[in-house]
Image (tube, grey):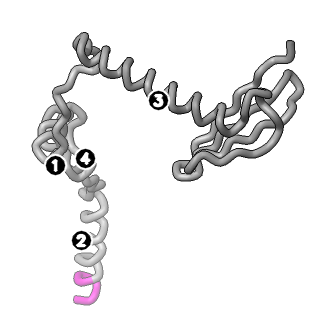
Amino acid sequence: MKEKVLLFVLFVCFSSFSFSQQLVYKSINPFFGGGDSFAYQQLLASANAQNDFQEENTNPFTQSSEIDNFTDNLNRQLLNSLSQGLFQEQIGSQGLSEGTYVYGSLVVEISPGVGGLSVSILNTSTGEQTQITIPNN
């Protein structure tokens, strides 16, 4: 009887190995990183449906009107006139002299440089900085 049980157990063990197969998991849902590689359109449609961002319909290449151009030009000329008046008042008629000047949130530093006179302008509120070199004559 023991031999029959032992033979039966061996038969079951060997038969399970001979008929076994390798199981491989392949996701069929493309939303979980698997499935068919041609599911691009489905994924794109789902992403677009969830997108709350709306693009502005403004054209950056539109031309401004003549009145807008005139107004901008007039504003530039007025600001230029005011800045020249402040510049002449602060620096005088002798021209640019070395030093540091403060105009509100702008700090203007004038110093001699390698190629000429160096003018550094720093906007302390935004951190923007510009450097201008005026060549020697």
Residue at the right extreme, as displayed: 114
Element assignment for label 4: loop
The mark nearer the N terminus, 4 or 1, is 1
- Which quarter of the rendered picture does the C terminus lie within? top right
The residue type indicated by label 2 comes to: Val
Residue count near mark 3 (Cα–Cα under 10 Å), binned few <14, some 14–19, many ≥20: few
Q: Tell me, for residue 34, which label it has, or none.
A: 4
Task: Give the foreground label among 4 and 3.
Answer: 3
4 falls in the magenta region: yes
Residue at the bottom extreme, as displayed: 2
| Residue at the disc numbered 3 | 79
Q: Nearer the viewer, residue 76 or 32?
A: 76
Q: Which residues are magenta?
A: 1-5
Q: Nearer the viewer, residue 47 or 14?
A: 47
Q: Quadrant of residue 7?
A: bottom left
Q: Nearer the viewer, residue 14 or 64?
A: 64
Q: Tell me, for residue 12, which label it has, or none.
A: 2
